[in-house]
Amino acid sequence: MLVEQYGPLKDKMLQIMDQDGIILRPELVPDLEDDTWLELYKVMVKTRCSDEQALLLQRQGRMLTYAPNTGQEAAQVGSAAAMAKTDWLVPAFRELGAWLYRGVDLEKVYLYWYGNERGSQFPEDVRVLPIAVPIASQLQHAVGIAMASSIKGEDDVTVAYVGDGGTSTGDFNEALNFAGVFNAPVVFLIQNNQYAISVPRQRQTKAETLVQKAVAAGIPGVLVDGNDLFAMYAATKEALNRARWGGGPTLIEAYTYRLGAHTTSDDPTKYRQDSEVLQWQEKDPLKRMKAYLIDKGLWSGEQDDSLSERFRQEALEVFRRVEATGETQLEDIFKYHFSEMPAHLREQLEQYKQYLEEVR
Amino acid sequence: MLVEQYGPLKDKMLQIMDQDGIILRPELVPDLEDDTWLELYKVMVKTRCSDEQALLLQRQGRMLTYAPNTGQEAAQVGSAAAMAKTDWLVPAFRELGAWLYRGVDLEKVYLYWYGNERGSQFPEDVRVLPIAVPIASQLQHAVGIAMASSIKGEDDVTVAYVGDGGTSTGDFNEALNFAGVFNAPVVFLIQNNQYAISVPRQRQTKAETLVQKAVAAGIPGVLVDGNDLFAMYAATKEALNRARWGGGPTLIEAYTYRLGAHTTSDDPTKYRQDSEVLQWQEKDPLKRMKAYLIDKGLWSGEQDDSLSERFRQEALEVFRRVEATGETQLEDIFKYHFSEMPAHLREQLEQYKQYLEEVR
Amino acid sequence: MALMNLISTINHTLDLEMARDSNVVVFGEDVGVEGGVFRATVGLQQKYGDKRCFDTPLAESAIVGAAVGMAINGLRPVAEIQFSGFVYPAYNQIISHVARMRNRTRGRRNLPLVIRMPHGGGIKALEHHSESLDTLLGHIPGLKVVTPSTPYDAKGLLLSAIRDDDPVIFLEPSKIYRAFRQEVPEEEYTIPIGKAKVLKVGTDITVVTWGAYVHEALKADKILQEEGINAEIIDLRTISPLDRDTIIDSVQKTGRFVVIHEAAKSFGPGAELMAIVNEGAFLYLEAPPTRIAGFDVTIPIPRGEHHYFMDAQRMAAGIRNVVRY
Amino acid sequence: MALMNLISTINHTLDLEMARDSNVVVFGEDVGVEGGVFRATVGLQQKYGDKRCFDTPLAESAIVGAAVGMAINGLRPVAEIQFSGFVYPAYNQIISHVARMRNRTRGRRNLPLVIRMPHGGGIKALEHHSESLDTLLGHIPGLKVVTPSTPYDAKGLLLSAIRDDDPVIFLEPSKIYRAFRQEVPEEEYTIPIGKAKVLKVGTDITVVTWGAYVHEALKADKILQEEGINAEIIDLRTISPLDRDTIIDSVQKTGRFVVIHEAAKSFGPGAELMAIVNEGAFLYLEAPPTRIAGFDVTIPIPRGEHHYFMDAQRMAAGIRNVVRY
Ligand SMILES: Cc1ncc(C[n+]2csc(CCOP(=O)(O)OP(=O)(O)O)c2C)c(N)n1
Ligand SMILES: Cc1ncc(C[n+]2csc(CCOP(=O)(O)OP(=O)(O)O)c2C)c(N)n1
Ligand SMILES: [Mg+2]
Ligand SMILES: [Mg+2]
C-alpha cells in the first residue's frame, strides 16, 4: 500500500512519472486505458485554457477577480478522476480541474467569478459543493457528508480540498479529528501550492511536511507529487478504496505549485523570486503528461495546439454567454434564503420595487 | 534528552517513580533537595485537602459548582514547580495544585467557585491567568504571552494547560502551529485525565496518544506519567529550558486520571466502571510520593495525618472568610469593563440604584 | 397526556421524531452515553443506536459544520451545543454556511438542520453559561431562531423545527428546564415558527418577552392587575423572523409598549422590537416604546447574577412607569 | 500636511505610533512581507523588523488570541483581520476574552489591543468580503468599536485606539480606502473615541450614518438642499459606546430622525439608534424615527450588489419621506 511507503513520516514522495514524462515506477501506474489518460489530459488542458482565457478577460476588465489554477491541474484532475460518480466533491476555491472533470459546467464557474450566485447552483445530480471562501470551513461539511453516507449505509466517499494555508486553521484539526473518530469515509486533499497568498509554506507551519498533520488525528496519510497525474490518481484511488471499504479517512498532501498569482488582485513578484517560478515551470503537470502521451504515440504537438485553440475559443464563447446574463435579478437576492419567503423579506422586496418604479 | 526517548512516536511513557514510590530511574531524578520534594508533596496534600473540603461544602449547599483535582496533583504541582518565578502560567480550569504552588491564594480559588469574579483577581506579581471556561481558548493567550516575551527579549517562559478533550478543538491546532512558527517559548501541558465530562479519551480522537499531536505542528513532545511527581518535574523542566534557550515550544502529555467527578454537577457512574476507578486509585500520585518520602525517612504517617488535618481546617477557615463576603457588590458588575466607565454604564448603574432605593 | 417539564418534553419530542423519521440524527458533546449534561437526550442512544445518537469530540465548529454536511447529504441532523456560550467557535459555520448555503446555491442545497442549545441565565452557573444570543443570531439573514417558554410549546416548536426544510436555531431556556410541569399530549402536533402568542389579552400596555422571562412577566402582570393595570402579555416564541403583525396589532390597541429581555441592552433584541413598533404603530403611541433590558455588562457569575436578572417586581416597576408616562 | 487617502493614512499612522512606542506590534495574514492585501502595513516590516511587524499563519482565532496574550504581557498589539467577514473564527476570542478579560479579573488585566479590519461593501468583492459587523460587535459589552469615514479621522481615531488601555475594534470602510485624498497633518493628534461628529448643521431632520455611507449621505444632503430640505448630518464615528448626547440633542432640535446603514435591517444598528431616540427625544418627534437599512439578505456578490448598497438618490428618497411625513 502506498500509505505504508509514502506515509506521513516516511520523508518520501510518491512519484510515478518524472518531470519529463518518463515513467519511473511502471508497477504503480494505475490500470486505465490509454484513452482514459488522454481524456484526463484533455480536462487538464481545458482547465489551463479556461484559466488563461479568464485571466485575459479579467485584464480586459470583463471578468472580475479570478483565482488561477495553472500548475495545479494534475492534482485536481488526478484526484477527481479517481472518484466514483456518486462520490461527493467538496472544494476549497481553486479546484477548476476537479470541477470540470466532475461535470460542473465552465459556464457555472465563469458565472461565479463574474459575480453571480447562479454560478454556485449546480445540477441536482452533480455531487459537488460550491466554493467555500472561509478557508478550511468546508472540511467540516465534507466530514458531515461522509458521516451521513456511513449512517445511511451508503458507500459514497467524500473528497475535500484545502490549501497549505488552510492547514493552520482550527477547522482543519477539528475536521480531521472528527473524521478519525467516526471513521468517516472522507479523503482530505491538501493542494500544497507552497503559498497562502504571500505567505510561503515554510512560514505557515514548522512541520516539515503537511501530510504529517495526519498523525494528530491518528489517520493515514500520503505525500504525493501533485504535478504527476498518475501519482495523484493512484494515491486518491487507494484512499477512496480504503474509505469505501470502511477504513476511514486519509490525508493526502499534493505537493504542487501555484504558477500564477493568488488571484487577479495579487502581484506575486512582491513576495517570490522569478527563479523559483522558473524551476517549477519545469515541473509543469501538463508539459510532462503531454510528453508522455506523445512518446506513447497517443498524441501529437499539432493535436495539442489545436485542442488548446479549441478550448480557448470555447471558453471565450462560454464567457460571452455569461457576459450576456448581465446583472443579477433583484428577486434573486431575496428569493432563496428560505424555502418560503417570509413576510419581512416580501415586504422589503416590494417596497424596493416600488421605489424603483417611482424613480424611473 | 527526554524528548528523544519519550517523544511523540516512541510509544514510551516517562516514569521515574513507580506506583509504589520505588525509584525506577535514579539517574533521571531531578536534582533537588529532599526538603524541596517534601515541600512539593505538601502542596499536593494541600490541593487534595482543599478539594475534599470544597466537595464537602458543596454537598452542604454552601459552595457552588466545583471542579475537583483529585488524582491530578502531581501533574499540576510537578509542572508548576519546574517554573521560574517570572514564568507565566495559563490554566484551563482544573489546575488548583499549580495555582497554589505559584502563589494563588486558596481564598481566591474558593471565591471563584463560590461565584465571585474577585476570585480571578490575583496579585499584580502573580503571573497566573484566571480560569478560562471556553475549552482550549486559553492556549492562544499563552502563545501571545510567550511571543511577547520573545519580542521584548525577555526569557520568561509560559506554561499552558489543556485537557484531553481540549485537544479536539480548533484552538489547539492553531495555538501549537502558531507557537511552532514563531518559536514561542511556551510549554503546552495536556492533563490527559482520560475523560472530557463523559466522553472517554478513546472517543475523543483516533490518535493513539495525545502527545503525537505535536507532530502536526512540527514541535517536540513527551509522554509522561502524570501521577509521577519526579517525571512531571523533569519533563517540564527540560521543556522550560529548551524554550528559555530559544528552542521553542514543547507539548507534554501528562497521562493521569480524574479520580473524582467532572464537576459537582456530574455523576461519573453514568459513564465509567468502578473497577477502572479502583485501578487508578492504586496509581494515586499522593500515595506513591508519600511512600517514597516515608521510605526515605523524610516523613511519617502521623505527620501526614496531622498535615492533612491542618490543611482541611485551614481550607474550612478560608471558606468561612469567603462565605462572609456574601454577594457581589452591585458596583462591581459595572466598574471593571473599561478603564473609565462610559456614560451609558454610569447611567444604567444610577438608574438601577434609584430603583433599589424606591422599592426599599 | 402526561405531566412533563421542559427538559423531559425535549427528550420525548426527539424520541417521537426519531421514531417517525429515520433521517433524524442527534449528536453533540456528552449527548450519547450520558444523555446530555441536562439529560435532553437520555435513552436515545440505547433506543436508536449509536449511529443515530452519539457523542462527538469537543469541537463546536465541527459539530455545526458536520450538521451542514449531513443535511446536504439527506439527513435531518439535530445538533446540541452544550451551552449557548460555547457556540462561538461555531459562529463562522453558522453565519458563513448554515445561514447561507441555500442562498449561495440559489436553492439547490436546503439545510434541514436544528441546532439546540440551553440559553439564558439565572441558574447560578459559571461564566459563559448564561448567555443570551437573541441579537447575535437574530441579526443573521437566513436563520430561523426559536425559543419556547413552556413544555407544550417546546414540543410543537421543536417538531416544526426538525421538519422545517431550513435551518432552525432552537434556544432552550435552561432556567425553566425543570421549573414546572405541564400537560403535554403524547401525540404529535406542531406550532408554527414565526408566530408570537398572546398569553393574556389586555388593554393598557403591550408587554413582549420570551423564554424564562415569560413567567416573571406573568407574575408582574398579577402585581399590576391588582393596581388596576391591564397589560397584554405576548410570548415572542420566535426571535427571527419576527411576528410583527401580532405585536403591531397589539400596540395599535394598547398604545403602549414594553419589551423585556435578558440580553444586554445596547444593540439588543429590544431595540429591534422598538424599531418595529416605531415602524408599525407610531401614531398610536401614548408613551415611548420602552425596553427593560439587561445591563451592558458581562453577565455576572452567581453571587452577582441577582443584580442582572430581573424579577417580577422589577418588571412591574418598569411596566408601571410606561403606563404612568 | 500631506494629501493622503484612507489606506495610506492608516499606514502613516501605524508608522508614527510604532516609531513612538516600541511596544506597538503589528501582525496578521500577509501583513509583513507583502504589507497587507490592501497595503495598510507596507514598509513597516522593513523599518521595524520582523519582530514588530510580521505575517502569521492562516488562523484568525490565534491572531486575536495571541493579541490578548501579548497585551497581557506588556505589548500593544495591533492585529489585522484580512476582511471583516473572516473574523468569525475569532469571534469566541473576541466575545469570551477580548471583551471580558478586564472585567473577569476585576481590573487586573487590561487589554490595550486593536483589531483592525476592512469593513463594509461596495467594492465588487467575493462573498464574505462585504460584511457589516456593527451590531455583531457593538452588542458585546466590553468592546469599543470605531469606524472612521475620512483619512483625517482615521489618523486621530487610530492613534486613540492604539493608546487606549481597553480593546478597540477598528473597522475600516474598504470602499473608501482609495476613494479620495485629504490633507492630513504629519504630526500626531487624537480624536476621542465615543464622540460622534456633526458634519453639517441642519434644522429639518437628523441623519446619522458612518463609514463609507457618510459620503453618499452628504451627496443626498445636496440633493435635498436643492429641494429646500436642511438636514443635520452626523457621522457616528464610534459604534460603541454610542454618543447618545449628540444624537439626542440633534433630534430634540430637528424633530425627525433617520439612520442609514449597510448592515441588514433586522436587529441591525439602526434599531439601536431608533431606540436611543425613543428614549431620549420621544416627545420631540414629529415623525417616526426611521432606518434606511440593508435588506435582510446575505450581501450579494458583485452582479447583485447594486441592489443592496445604496446611492445618494435612494438615501435622499428615504430622508424625504420622513421629512414629508
Ligand atoms: C478564514 C479566512 N481567512 C482569510 C481568508 C483570506 N484568504 C483567501 S485565500 C487565502 C490564502 C489561502 O491559502 P491556501 O489555503 O494555501 O490556498 P491557496 O490560495 O494557495 O489555494 C487567504 C488568507 C479567507 N478566505 N478565509
Ligand atoms: C468550547 C467549550 N465547549 C464545551 C464546554 C463545556 N465543557 C466544560 S468542561 C468540558 C470537558 C473538558 O474536558 P477536558 O478538556 O478533558 O478537561 P477536563 O474536564 O477533563 O479537565 C466541556 C465539554 C466548554 N467549557 N467550552
Ligand atoms: Mg496555498
Ligand atoms: Mg479530561
Image (spheres, coloured by chain):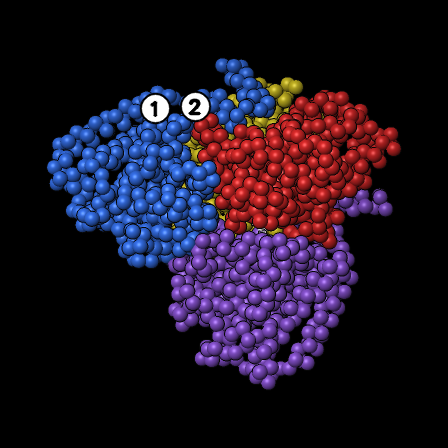
Chain colours: A blue, B purple, C red, D yellow
Vertical side of B230 occupied by B132: above or below: above
Residue beneath the point at 40% across and 27% down: A124
Say left or right for D325 vs A98: right
Does mark 2's beta carbon lie closer than 8 Å to ligand 1? no
Q: On the image, which quarter does residue B307 sit in?
A: bottom right
Q: Dot 2: what SS? A: loop
Subunit of label 1:
A
Q: CA gap, disc 1 to disc 2?
A: 11 Å
Any part of residue A282 in sight: yes
Observer-nearest residue: A282 or C256?
A282
Q: Dot 1: what SS? A: helix
Circles 1 and 2: CB distance less than 8 Å? no
| Residue closest to the far bottom | B297
Other-residue count near label 2 (Cα within 10 Å), few / some / many at <14 / 14–19 / ≥20:
many
Vertical side of C54 occupied by B123: above or below: below
Q: Which residue is mark 1?
A: A322
Which amino acid, by three-letter code, is at mark 2? Thr
Q: On the image, which quarter does residue A156 sit in?
A: top left
Observer-nearest residue: A204 or C81?
C81
Q: Which residue is mark 2?
A: A328
Q: Position of residue B224 (x, y in %)?
A: 48, 67
